[in-house]
Image (spheres, helix red, strand yellow):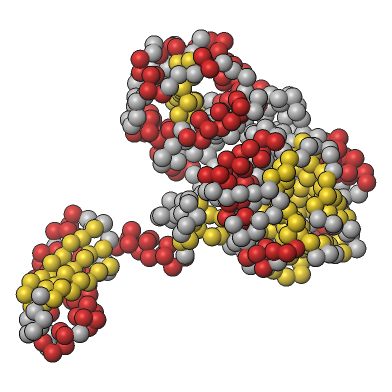
Amino acid sequence: MLHVIPLGGLGEIGLNAMVLACRGEMLLIDAGLMFPSSGMPGVDIIVPDFTHLQRNAAQVKGVLLTHGHEDHIGALPYLLGELPVPIYGTRFTLALARNRLEELGVKADLREIEPRTPFPVGSVFTVEATRVTHTVPDAVGFIVRSPEGTVIHTGDFKLDPDPIDGLKTDLERWGEAGDEGVLCLLSDSTNSEHVDETGSERVVQTTFERLFHETKGRIVVAQFSSNLHRIRHLLALCERTGRLVALQGRSMVRNVELAREMGYLDVPDSLFVHLDNVPKLAPHRVAVLTTGAQGEPRAGLTQLANGDGPVRLEPGDTVIVSARPIPGNERSVGALLDQLHWRGARIVYAQVEPGVHVSGHASRPQQRRVLELIRPRNFIPVHGEVRHLHRHLTTAREAGMTAEGLLLAHDGDVVTFEGGRGRFTGSVPSGRIMMERSGDGVVTTETLAERNKLAETGVVAAAVVLRRDTQALVAGPQLSGQGLSPDEQGVLARVAQEARAYFEELNPLLRGDDALVREELTKAVKRAFKQHTSRRTLVVPLVVRV
C-alpha cells in the first residue's frame, strides 16, 4: 500500500508539505511556511505541525524540494531541528534553502539533483525531477515510483511557451510517464478559478520596455525578490536605457547577490548604486528594485510609502507594483497603494496595467492539458484554498476522469492506494504552529486569543499601596491605561475614586491576603469602568506594601 498524507497546503495558500509513505518508509515533498494574517499579533510565521513525522522519525528517508519559495522551504529549519534527514533539490533551490538554514544556525545534508536523472530515496522510492516553469529558477516537479505505482507531483508550475530562460515545463516527460501509467497525480490548484491562459513572462518584458521608455523620471519596481527571471530582464533593461540600479530590501539584496555568484545574473558591478546615493542622481538615471509588493509592513515599498529611508517619492516618479495580491493580502495591498498615491508619484499596478505581472501558476486550461496528458488513475488537487481544490476537481471531471478517481483531501487526511484505487483510511495530527521568526517561541491559540482580547478591550493597570502592620490603604488605586480611547482615558480618575470607595469598605483583616486584595481590586476597577464605558477592560492589579 501507498499512503499520501498532506500536512499542509490543502486548504490554504502556503504551508506546503506532502508525505508519501510505503512499506515502512516515508519521504516529504516540500516543507513550507505561511505568513500570518492581520489578526495574529506577535506571530511572525506559521509552519505545519510535523508531529506525525517526528513520531515516525526512523521511517523518514528524505525531503524533496520543488523550488525555493518560502511557502515550500521556509519550514525546513523547524523540521530539521527534530529530524536531521537528507534534503534533495536543484542547485539554486538548495542555495536558497542553505541561506534560510544558516540564518537560524541549522546544519543540513543538502544533496543536489538534476532533472531527468532518477535517484533513490531510501530503499522503497525512486525519484525523478522534471523541469517546470515557475517564477524562480530551477523549479521542478517529481515523478515518484513506488511498489504500489507512480505518483507525479507537479510542484508550482505554468505552461509558458516562451520562458525567459528557455526552460519549458517538461510535458514530454510527464506524457511518457502517463503512457507508462500514473497511479495518482498531485497538481497545483492555485489558479484553478482563472479561465484565461496564464500569460508568458515575455508579456511583462514587453510592458516594462514601454514603461521604461515613456518614463522620464525615477522608476521604482516592487516585486517578489525570488522572481529572478523578471529581475534579469529588468537589469538588462536598465543597462540598455542607461539607468543605474539600487536594491532595497534585505531579501532583494541577498537574492540578487546569490544569483550573481551562481551565474544566473550576468551583470557588471558598475550597474549598481547604493540606495543612499539615489537622491544625488538625476531621476532619469536611476531605478530602484524593491520588496514589499504584498504590503508587508517592514518591506521596502512600505518604507517608500511612509516617507522613511533615503529615497523619497515625488511627482514625476513612477512606481510599478509587479505582483497581484496573494489571497488574504488584498486589504493591506490596497492601503499601500492608497498611501503611494498620496506621495504624488504615478502608480502602475496589475489592475490598471495587466501587463506588469503574469502569474507563475497554471490556469484552468493549462491544468486541463496536464490532466489529459498524464491521464492518471487518481487525482488529488494540491496547493490551494478549498474552493481552488474543488474547482480543480471539476476540471478533472471535464477532462474525462471518473468520480471514483477524484479525491478531495485536506491537511491530515490519510489517502491509501491499493490495487490502483485510493480511499480515505484515517487521519494524522496536522495543523498550524504559530511562531516567532527565530523559532524560539511558539504562540499558542490561547495566547493569540488573549492578545486579540487586549487589542479589543485595552488594559488598565491598577496599583494600591497598603501598610504592612495595619493593612491601611496608603495610596491608590492609581490607574494607568493602554489601548483605551480618549473617552475611556478621561474616566480613569472617576473610576479610581469609585474603586477606592469600594476598596475602603473591605474588611482590614482581609487586606492581609495579597491574592484576595488583587481579586477585590480587579473587581472594583472593572465594576466602575463598566458603569462609565459599558466596556469590560482587562485589569492588571498590583499590590505594594510599605
Q: At x 68% / y 27%, what residue is drawn?
A: 200
Taking depth in this image into account, of 164 and 469 the one nearest to the observer is 469
Which quadrant of the view contains residue 421? bottom right
What residue appears at the point 26 percent right and 67 percent down from the top-left corner?
537
Name the residue rendered at 73%, 64% in the picture. 58
Quadrant where the C terminus lies?
bottom left
Is residue 527 at all visible to an observer of this figure? no
Callout count: 0
> Does residue 449 sit above or below 317 in this rendering?
below
Q: Position of residue 101 (x, y in %)?
A: 58, 46
Counting from the top left corner in percent of width and height, residue 159 is at: 74, 33
- Image height check: is 232 above or below 69? above
Question: Residue 279: x and y, percent?
Answer: 35, 18
From this view, report whether residue 307 is shown above or below residue 157: above
**Residue appearing at x 62%, y 23% in the figure:** 265
Locate residue 167: give its quadrant.
top right
